[in-house]
Image (tube, rainbow, N blue to C red):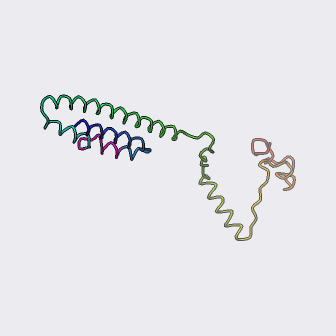
Amino acid sequence: MKTKLQQLKDEFLKQLNTVTDPEKLREFELKFLSRKGELAQVMSSIKDLSDEARKEAGALANSIKTELQEQFDNVKKALDEKKDASSEADITLPGKKITTGHLSPLTLVQNEIEDLFTSMGFMVLDGPELESDYYNFEALNVPPHHPARDMQDTFYC
């Protein structure tokens, strides 16, 4: 029984050193430390021994089990730390592109109408938002004392 436990311990430690990723670690745990694993099978065979041999084998099996569990936890912790270190954000990478907004419905309709009229041969021109006195009145031959030139009746400033 002692040799079986020692062989199991040696095989466990040898294979534990080859585990490099969490998936293999999970398979390794199922193979050795699960309820149907190799260690559980060896420990279940202890009940068939005599009383004195059972005490010795049980104590040895429990000490080996705790040692193997500690080794397994250390490797698992190391893999988790390695995984966490590799998943940190790289601040040197370019940021996410900010999506811009969209045109208002009024602008979309204006663009459609402008496209329609330009397809018919018209031109779209922009002018100043405030017109001068000349373009509002003089060029239209409005006399200087005409009521349309009163300040309350016009947008001209």
Which is more toward the observer, 72 or 123? 72
**Residue 127: image location, x then y, percent:** 79, 54
Q: Is residue 122 magenta?
A: no
The quarter of the displayed image where residue 29 is located = top left
Quadrant location of the N terminus in the rendered image = top left
Magenta highlight range: 26-36
**Residue 73: image location, x then y, percent:** 37, 34
State left or right for residue 109 relative to residue 145: left
**Residue 26: image location, x then y, percent:** 35, 44
Label tally: 0
3 relative to 103, above or below: above
45 relative to 144, above or below: above
Quadrant location of the C terminus in the rendered image = top right
State left or right for residue 146 relative to residue 25: right
The quarter of the displayed image where residue 75 is located = top left
Seen as rendered, the residue at the extreme bottom is 120
Q: Which residue is drawn at 81% across and 46% down?
A: 149
Which is more toward the observer, 2 or 111? 2
Q: Does the magenta stretch include residue 33?
A: yes
